Image (cartoon, grey):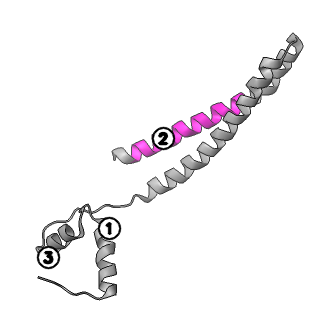
Amino acid sequence: MQVRVTPSEMESIKKEFSKSTCRKLSEYLRRKLTDKPIATYTRNQSLDEFMVELIRLNKELNAIGNNYNQVVKRLHNLQHLGELKAWQLTNESSRQVLLKKVDEIKTKITQINHQWLQ
């Protein structure tokens, strides 16, 4: 048996097929024609927002990590106790920024965890 459809109908069929869990278009069409249930994917908008936030935090953490690596290299080159104390005072603020970002990530992960468990 063959069925002919217009290009716009085929586009609509493919669009609906892409939302389904069917692996093949033929499987999707058989289920559709026989009125069998078709499982579909639903997109979670809050997950998209979470991913955007995680990407932003990841970029910030990478920048902080790069700064940290540079600071450690400088620490290895210090030769006097006075330089070491100055380094410690200067980098305490960087440490606080890092801890704040880690807490922010933990909070976001907890938020998404609560959403998924509902």
Left or right position of 10 against 50: left
Q: Secondary structure at mark 2?
A: helix
> Image height check: is 45 above or below 82?
below
> Image height check: is 76 above or below 22?
above
Left or right position of 49 against 23: right
Dominant secondary-structure state across the stretch colored magenta: helix
Kindly identify the residue that appears in the image at 69 percent across and 40 percent down: 63
Report the Cα–Cα distance between label 1 and label 2. 29 Å
Quadrant location of the N terminus? bottom left
Please name whichever residue, 76 or 111, is drawn nearer the observer in this view of the structure: 76
Q: Which residues are magenta?
A: 95-115
The answer to which of marks 1 and 2 sits earlier in the sequence is: 1
Q: Which residue is mark 2?
A: 109
Q: Residue furthest front?
A: 1
> Image height check: is 31 above or below 3?
above
Task: Tell me the kind of residue under disc 1.
Answer: Ser
Report the Cα–Cα distance between label 2 and label 3. 42 Å
Q: Which residue is mark 1?
A: 18
